[in-house]
Amino acid sequence: ELKSKVAVVTGSTSGIGLAVAESLAQAGCQVMLNGFGEEAAIQQLQSRLSEQYGVAVGYSPADVACPEAVAMMIRDTQEQFGGVDILVNNAGVQHVAAVEDFPAQQWDKIIAVNLSSAFHAIQQVLPGMKARGWGRIINVASIHGLVASPYKSAYVAAKHGVIGLTKTVALETAKAGVTCNAICPGYVLTPLVENQIADTARARGLTEQQVMEDVLLGSQPTKRFTSVEDIAAMAVFLCGPASTNITGSVQVLDGGYTAM
Ligand code: NAD
């Protein structure tokens, strides 16, 4: 069913987005990659995916913090592949600091990348999806869209916003053949998390080992990180035939974090 669908995955040069893009390519989708990275590495990724799965793989360098760049990424995809059937809003950044020390610039950037980019991309893809009567929008939120942690005010606010956006788009598209869902991972060991271990250690006066064991996995009852492959499998499921009546939902993959 996903053969020759066109998927845009923001922030797909690393971590969760890369795994989602790869799984969609494996399912037969043409994929538009996006995110930062070295040109050579990105070209290598494009040819690996397209050779391995026999699909076309494009790349947009759009900085999704910029609405015009998001619009250009969607236009480029439409021109190269004829439309956008699947949109995965995944690009995200983090900054860890107490509210009173939180740099306003970091606040603005996190809201732009983690929340507003999804709005701008959705706005661009919806007319085509509605016209074709088929569309899948997946927003990678976080357990921080459901609960908070200290020192992550912008991230928590943005991710709560993503869930609100997800539900609103789901209601507006409910009869159009389009679904819009959120995925909420708990902790996944990607560069995003690896980078904040040092910052969290500093903010809380702990060692990096203590942050891993007590702060990250301390709140995940399974004591395991969720894998990027498991999140990708959920994304593919949400695009597949069993999920046509799943919309406005929040899929939580958190090792029991939010059950506590
Ligand atoms: P990552 O740092 O490994 O990857 C982030 C990707 O986003 C990279 O490809 C990067 O180049 C891209 N990116 C960053 N800023 C961008 C911008 N302005 N424009 C375009 N691309 C940009 O992070 P990850 O852990 O894979 O995170 C992916 C998503 O999953 C994020 O939305 C994050 O909040 C969410 N998430 C991650 C975890 C986790 O534990 N890792 C948990 C819950 C939610």
Image (cartoon, rainbow, N blue to C red):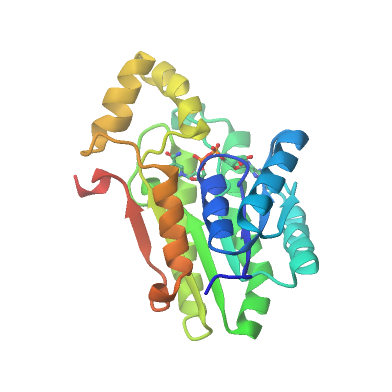
Whole-percent x, y for residue 5 in the image = 62, 70
Q: Nearer the viewer, residue 227 or 165?
A: 227
Residue in view at x 74 percent, y 57 percent: 73
Whole-percent x, y for residue 88 in the image = 56, 58
Residue 239's place in the image compared with 97, above or below, is: below
Q: Nearer the viewer, residue 169 or 184?
A: 184
Whether residue 246 is visible, yes or no, is: no
**Ligand 1 - quadrant of the structure image:** top right
Location of the C terminus by quadrant is top left
Residue in view at x 44 percent, y 68 percent: 167
Whole-percent x, y for residue 145 in the image = 40, 51
Q: Nearer the viewer, residue 231 or 145?
A: 231
Q: Is residue 215 left or right of residue 196?
A: left
Q: Nearer the viewer, residue 30 or 77?
A: 30
* Count of marks, rendered view: 0
Residue 64's place in the image compared with 207, above or below, is: below
Q: Is residue 55 left or right of residue 82?
A: left
Q: Is residue 209 left or right of residue 173?
A: left
Whether residue 187 is visible, yes or no, is: yes
Hey, which quadrant is residue 13 in on the image? top right
Hey, which quadrant is residue 244 in on the image? bottom left
Whole-percent x, y for residue 110 in the image = 57, 42
Residue 192's place in the image compared with 7, above or below, is: above
Residue in view at x 47 percent, y 81 percent: 174
Residue 187's place in the image compared with 25, above or below, is: above
